[in-house]
Amino acid sequence: MTATKRKLAIVTGGGSGIGLAIAGKFVQQGIRVVIAGRNQERLDTAQQQLGELCHAIPCDVTDLAAIPGFVQTVIDRHGPIDILVNNAGTNMKKDFTDVTDEEFQQVILTNLSAVFSMSREVVKHMLLQQNGCIINISSMAAQYGIPKVIAYSASKTAIDGMTRAMAVELSPKGIRVNAIAPGFIYSDMTAKALDSDPERKAKVFARTPMGTMGQPADIGEAAYFLASDAAKFITGVILPVDGGNSIGF
Ligand code: NDP
């Protein structure tokens, strides 16, 4: 297959954890991937690991004014965008009353406002080709209440609503929009949140019927499915990939 006939995906936060696993699965399936993040060294390492179908373009998604330029750079260098995975995210674990307005805003900016701005800019181009697929990364924090992650919970719950609203508006125009709600997946983020809190970790395992945490690759598989033609009639869903955590007793 020639390079230009291969689909092109953007994966934000594609230099590590879940984003890297999604990018890796896409590349393995012959999809060209642009990984975006702030840490150039991390992006370069990921790019070398994934090979020539992977390209790294630095981007801080919280710099909303720079997003149109980032999307244009992707298109100028690599052509039309077929798939956008809004994976970049941040978490902050603190007691409710200790969270400052600035901290709350920062999480909302990364996990929600940036997802809106990035999607809007990419959709402008997808509308021209009347075709596209957007995958947002949600969380169990949008399925049930988790203490000490107030801003994160607010942001991910809003992602679910935005996914549905985007799906009803954009699906008639050929753009499918879905979300994946990962359960507890081994990554830097969960290490920070759980390793210092054995009680929380025990609770995670206790309410996960499959009795284990997931691997980033489990999310990569689900993202590839949602991006593929196998999911051509699927839009507006929030797909839990969680070992049953969301329905656990
Ligand atoms: P990581 O901390 O490993 O990855 C987060 C990624 O987001 C990094 O690559 C980071 O890159 C990128 N990122 C963060 N802030 C920005 C920014 N301002 N601009 C650009 N990129 C940014 O965590 P995970 O892989 O675990 O998380 C990935 C997604 O999955 C997140 O949305 C998270 O909320 C979600 N999720 C994770 C779960 C889990 O159990 N691990 C469970 C549920 C949801 P860099 O630092 O280079 O900018």
Image: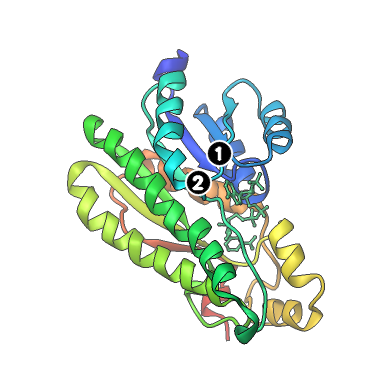
Residue at the image position 70 percent from the left and 82 percent from the top: 203
In percent of width and height, residue 192 lies at 75, 65
Mark 1 lies within 8 Å of ligand 1 (Cβ measured): yes
Q: Which residue lies most toward the top here?
A: 2
**Are circles 2 and 1 on residues that touch, CB within 8 Å?**
yes
Name the residue at 76% across, 63% down. Answer: 191
Q: Nearer the viewer, residue 220 or 119?
A: 119
Q: Nearer the viewer, mark 2 or mark 1?
A: 2
Instruction: Locate the C terminus and report the quarter of the image it occupies.
Output: bottom right
Seen in the picture, residue 54 relative to 228 is either above or below; the reply is above
The kind of residue on which mark 2 rests is Asp
Pick out the residue farthest to the left: 172
> Which residue is pictured at 46% across the width and 39% down the height?
66
User: SS class of the residue under badge 2?
Assistant: loop
Residue with the mark numbered 1: 59
Residue 186 visible to an observer of this rendering: no
Q: Which residue is mark 2?
A: 63
Label 1: state its secondary structure.
loop
Question: For mark 2, does the 10 Å Cα neighbourhood hold few (<14), some (14 to 19), or many (20 or more) residues?
Answer: few
Residue placed most toward the observer, 57 or 186: 57
**In the rendered structure, which amino acid carries the disc numbered 1?**
Cys
- Check mark 2 vs ligand 1: CB closer than 8 Å? yes or no: yes
Q: Inspect this view and state whether residue 157 appears.
A: yes
> Residue 109 location in percent, x, y?
49, 59
